Image: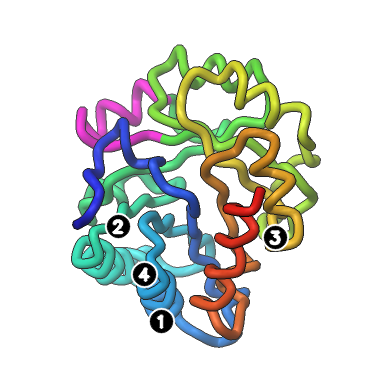
Amino acid sequence: MTRPITRNTILDTDLYCLTAEKFSGGRSNIDVVRDMLAAGVSLVQYREKSKSMRDKYEECLALRQMTREAGAAFIVNDDVHLGVLTGADGVHIGQDDLPVAAVRQLVGEHVAIGVSTHSPEQAQKAKADGADYIGVGPIFKTFTKEDVCDPVGFAYLEWAAANAGLPFVAIGGIKAHNVADVVRRGARCVAMVTEIVAAKDIPHTIDTIRRHMANA
């Protein structure tokens, strides 16, 4: 039985997995996501910066079909139009992207909108603007993104757990060895990139991460 995927439930999961083909050891996004889904992951975000629009469109169509068959949510990062065209369940935007109100006009009422935030002020604005969930981070230093800000540490994470008032995903430098600390500070959903896409055995790595989360 698959979980219902709506704007309100899209973050009702433990792992928020992202694509990053440059870190996947020569494997395609399709192969990596297939392993994620086989391990029971129920949320995948497509994040690719350097591919052509045609390649991203065709890849998203394939991933949308795979996630739909697996009962998993599919989110597209940054490119709102790509998310709409490929039937994504959600789109994720940053602080310098289109405002939430404009994105809502493009995606309609049934698609979730997530916003990356790095401070309580940004979280409060995202909520006021109508975001369905927020990203909280980067918790630790991360090298996955070139334009990433400095780590926000546990202070903002703990604030979000107590005060955000909407679902959030902790992101940024989270690994198997530190995920328990993140969970203990209030994160129910955590995002990981290289820890999963670079793993030689993705299902085994995901199982290990989940055991650390459960023990926290």
Amino acid beneath label 1: Asp
Query: Marks 1 and 2: which is nearer the front?
Result: 2
Lower sequence index among marks 3 and 4: 4
Where residue 183 sits, quadrant-wise, is top right
Q: CA distance from mark 3 to mark 1?
A: 21 Å
The percent position of residue 123, horizontal first and vertical second, equals: 57, 22
Give the Cα separation between the discs numbered 4 and 1. Answer: 10 Å
Residue 69 % position (x, y): 19, 66
| Residue farthest front in this picture | 215
| Residue 19 highlighted magenta (yes or no) | no
Q: Earlier in the sequence, mark 4 or mark 1?
A: 1
Circle 2 sits in a helix, a strand or a loop, which is it? loop
Task: First in sequence, mark 2 or 3: give its number.
Answer: 2
How far apart are the two marked residues, 1 and 2, measured between alpha carbons? 16 Å
Q: Which residues are magenta?
A: 100-113
Per the model, the C-alpha gap separating discs 2 and 3 is: 22 Å
Q: Which marked residue is nearer to the observer: mark 4 or mark 1?
A: 4
Category of crowding for the residue at label 2, using alpha-carbon neighbours closer than 10 angstroms: few (below 14), some (14–19), many (at least 20): many
Bin the neighbour count of mark 3 within 10 Å (Cα to Cα): few under 14, some 14-19, many 20 and up. Answer: some
Which numbered dot is residue 37? 4
Give the residue at mark 1. Answer: 31
Q: Which residue is mark 2?
A: 72
**Marks 2/4: CA distance?**
8 Å
- For badge 4, the amino acid type reads Leu
Q: Disc 3 designates what residue?
A: 175
User: Do tag 2 and tag 4 residues touch (Cβ < 8 Å)?
Assistant: yes
Figure check: 157 above or below 180: above
Task: Pick whichever of labels 2 and 4 is earlier in the sequence.
Answer: 4
